[in-house]
Image (spheres, rainbow, N blue to C red):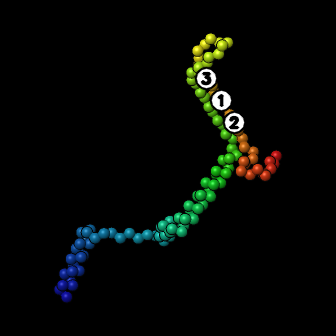
Amino acid sequence: MKKFLFIMLFWTGFSLLGVSQPLYALSLSQAIEDAIINNPEFRQEVKAYQAIEAEVASAKGGYYPVIDLSAGIGYEEVNTPITNSSGLMRRETAVRLTQNYLKASQPNQKLSV
């Protein structure tokens, strides 16, 4: 009995000093959220959904207009009998706007206006 009482007082003293680790309880909603988020099947479904969203965004992107800008500068060597020059400085710029009405992968698709 004395040994049991000594052990109880010993552990009580440690707990009063703060040596023991505190216990944290989760609320029901936190426990459910944690279980759902850490579920591998749920994660797989989320990844599949994100892949489908990316596919749809990629498909929609093919119908948006595209603007291409290009520029160039450089020295060009020219030797012709008409002009006696040895070369010229070439500068060029271009802007191109394109709009896809039909997808190239679906040639049978009809354009509805």
**In which image quadrant can residue 41 be found?**
bottom right
Q: Nearer the viewer, residue 89 or 50?
A: 89
Label 2 neighbourhood size at 10 Å, few (<14), some (14-19), many (20+)? few
Marks 3 and 2, how far apart at CA: 21 Å
Residue with the most extreme front position: 81
Label 1, secondary structure: give it: strand
Task: Give amino acid for label 3.
Answer: Arg
Residue with the most extreme right position: 113
Upstream in the sequence, badge 3 or badge 2? 3
- Residue at image mark 3: 91
Decide if residue 94 is on the left or right side of residue 107: left
* Residue 94, above or below 11: above
Q: Nearer the viewer, residue 46 or 25?
A: 46
Is the N terminus in the top left, top right, bottom left or bottom right quadrant? bottom left
Residue with the most extreme left position: 2
Name the mark on residue 94.
1
Task: Give amino acid for label 1.
Answer: Ala
Label 2, secondary structure: give it: strand
- Residue at image mark 2: 97
Q: Nearer the viewer, mark 1 or mark 2?
A: 1
Please tell me which residue is depicted at 20% across the width and 83% down the height of the picture: 5
Determine contact: label 3, label 1, CB under 8 Å: no
Whole-percent x, y for residue 29 in the image: 50, 69
* Residue 36, above or below 50: below
Q: Is residue 101 visible?
A: yes
Q: Is residue 88 visible?
A: no
Determine contact: label 3, label 2, CB under 8 Å: no
Please tell me which residue is depicted at 21% across the width and 84% down the height of the picture: 4
